[in-house]
Image (cartoon, rainbow, N blue to C red):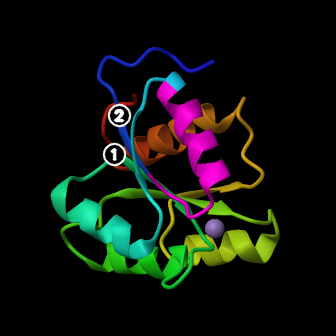
Amino acid sequence: MSMAKPTKLNVLIVEDNSANLMLASAVLRRAGYRVSEARSAEDAIVRLAHSKPDLILMDVQLPGQDGLALTRQIKADPETADLIVVALTAHAMKEDRARALDAGCDGYIAKPINTRTLADELDGVLRARRLALGRAAL
Ligand code: MN
């Protein structure tokens, strides 16, 4: 189980598949996250111009610009380079994980989404990232 959080963390879910988007959104809201949603890279870029989430859950396979290309763009822009990006990959294949990390992702989660572990996995990535930056743990 996730520990209660003193302040709500904001997560942006970028996912074109409605069922996955609704599932991830419901699970993370229940876990105490504040959730915003984007269905394409273009949609995500518009949202990021207005507010910066604590974490982005990024589907790799998107129509048009894909999730890894969008991650590279986010990491190349000083305005968004510090954002934590967790890839949602279709396969847990070694090369998919390597491609996600190579694109700048801070972590990855394989589909299908496990509703029992998703929030804890994101918490783990956030904690590891903050420790790596020498900040206080969550
Ligand atoms: Mn997709």
Q: Quadrant of ligand 1?
A: bottom right
| Residue 18 forms part of the magenta stretch | yes
The local crowd at label 1, few if under 14, some if 14 to 19, many if 20 or more residues have their Cα within 10 Å, is some
| Label ID, residue 9 | 2
Residue 127 in the image: state x and y as whole percent: 46, 37
Nearer to me, 124 or 11:
11
Question: Residue type at mark 2?
Answer: Leu
The image position of residue 25, as x and y in percent, is 53, 40
In screen coordinates, is 90 left or right of 85?
Answer: right
Farthest residue, direction front: 18
Residue at x 30%, y 70% (from the top left corner):
45
Q: Is residue 126 above or below residue 116?
A: below
Instruction: Specify whether tag 2 is near ligand 1 (CB below 8 Å).
Output: no
Task: Say which residue appears at 29% left-offset and 68% top-offset.
Answer: 81
Q: Is residue 79 above or below residue 124?
A: below
Question: What residue is shown with label 1?
Answer: 54
Mark 2 crowd level (few <14, some 14–19, many ≥20, 10 Å Cα):
some
The answer to whether residue 80 is above or below residue 102 is above
**Which secondary structure is most common in the magenta stretch?**
helix
Q: Secondary structure at mark 2?
A: loop
In the rendered view of the protein, which quadrant contains the N terminus?
top right
The quarter holding residue 137 reads top left
Measuring 48% from the left and 84% from the top, which residue is drawn there? 65
Three-letter code, disc 1: Asp
Q: Secondary structure at mark 1?
A: loop
Q: Residue at x 52, y 33 (%)?
A: 28
Q: Earlier in the sequence, mark 2 or mark 1?
A: 2
Q: What residue span does the magenta drawing correspond to?
A: 13-29
Q: Where residue 8 is drawn, which disc sits there? A: none
| Residue 37 placement (x, y as % from top left) | 42, 51
**Disc 2 to disc 1: CB gap under 8 Å:** yes
